[in-house]
Image: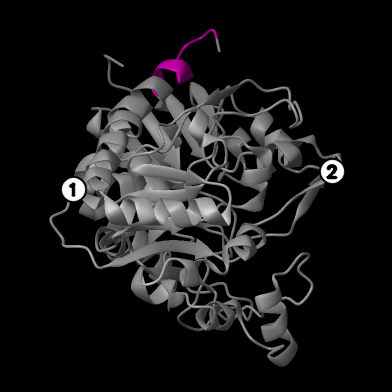
Amino acid sequence: MDSSLRIIVTGLIAQHRLLGGVTWDYLQVVLGIKRLGHDVYYIEGSGEWPYSFDGPAGGDGVANDPRPTVEHLASVMARFGLSTKWAYQFPPTSEWFGLSDEKRTDLIRSADLLINVSGTLERPEDYRGVRRLVYIDTDPVFTQIDIAGDNSGRRHQVDAHDVHFTFGECLGKHLPDTGHRWHPTRQPIVLSEWVSSVPHHDVFTTVMNWTSYKVVMYCGRTYGQKDVEFLKFMGLPQKVLPTTLEVALHKPHIRWPSNYENTPACIRSLDRDNATWTPHEVLTQLGWRVVDATEVCSDSDSYRRYIQQSKGEWSVAKNGYVEGKAGWFSCRSACYLAAGRPVIVQDTGFSKVLPVGEGLLAFGTLDEAEAGIREVEGNYRRHAKAARSIAEAYFDSDKVLNRLLEVAMDSKY
């Protein structure tokens, strides 16, 4: 875009203040737009209570005191020169922080564009004073199935927008037609934030939730979470010795379920004798190194450092992404690439739109996962160089966001 726009970006930076990766998910959209010379603001009005893992909460893992949440968001915004460019609504009291009511109202009336990342606004219809409203679907397959549901509460939120984007660059015909034109886009990475001279440790890592929400059904097919896919690769550490595989896992207190279908024999034997074990304990017994994500990467700096100090990433994807083959690719993996760290991840269809084989290796089976790790171990410098090159060519925020803004402001869409 040649002319400067006034743009509002939404997100969940405050709600997930102890998850460094979530901060980067939304922050890089804001910073990327700022880099392009636009007048950018951040508004968080999700209507969802912030999580609390480190202190008194409402008894269900959410915070009652807004101060830690507000202080976190204010600190992040100030660090990047946005101390007067943010607003946050604390759901328990509906109290707003940051921009005054008057300035927030004026912003909504004068903004050219609102980019609702992940559909995080509780009431997008309240922002119709903005010239154009954009919805970015960051959870493809699940989003389309949800919207198609008879009792979907999300459809009216999505319908409130003028233009729709999705990280599912390969949405297929087997998914429901929601009636929207889904423009493909991908995670924008501010490359300068990931340049590093930090030496890496000799370990492949990833950061993940074991599971996020319940399995969903559509047309007789199930679409589940990461736990479903991880089961297929539980024996990988023994196959790639002496290579170390580490998982930074959120919520290690979750009990290991005993009702997984097609559970590998090695897990069934553990489960019979240790019915109260957590995924953390099961993974450790099978040779994985497991660390608590809330300790090693709870803020943006430690998250970035964790990635930069890794040799590379190995990870599975949500079962829904794998089954849906929509081409989803994570912000986390893109950050590994930007840091010059090779990425070995389960294919969700992204191999149709991204180059694979050097720097980025896709796998579908246990044997392919093992081969990918051995290939990177044997030719590390070549793969590390290729990783950064892929980030520069495909995830550079300048390129990704320029294209998004061009489509978003085009009146024909």
What residue do we see at 38% from left, 49% from top? 343
Residues under labels 2 and 1: Cα distance?
46 Å
- Residue hosting label 2: 151
Residue type, label 1: Val
**Quarter-wise, where is residue 191 in the image?**
top left
Q: Which residues are magenta?
A: 405-412
What residue do we see at 50% from left, 81% from top? 284
Q: Nearer the viewer, mark 2 or mark 1?
A: 1
Q: Secondary structure at mark 1?
A: loop
Residue 119 at x, y percent in the picture = 58, 41
Q: Is residue 232 left or right of residue 27?
A: right
Structural crowding at the residue carrying mark 1, measured as other residues with C-alpha within 10 Å and reported as few (<14), some (14–19) or many (≥20): few
What residue do we see at 32% from left, 49% from top? 342
* Quadrant containing the N terminus in the rendered view: top left
Between 63 and 211, the one lying in front of the other is 211
The answer to whether any part of residue 100 appears in the image is no
Q: Would you place residue 24 above or below residue 392 in this image?
A: below
Q: Secondary structure at mark 2?
A: loop
The answer to whether any part of residue 161 appears in the image is yes
Farthest-out residue, top: 412
Between 104 and 150, the one lying in front of the other is 150
- Residue hosting label 1: 195
Residue type, label 2: Asn
Q: Is residue 377 left or right of residue 406?
A: left
What residue do we see at 70% from left, 54% from top? 224
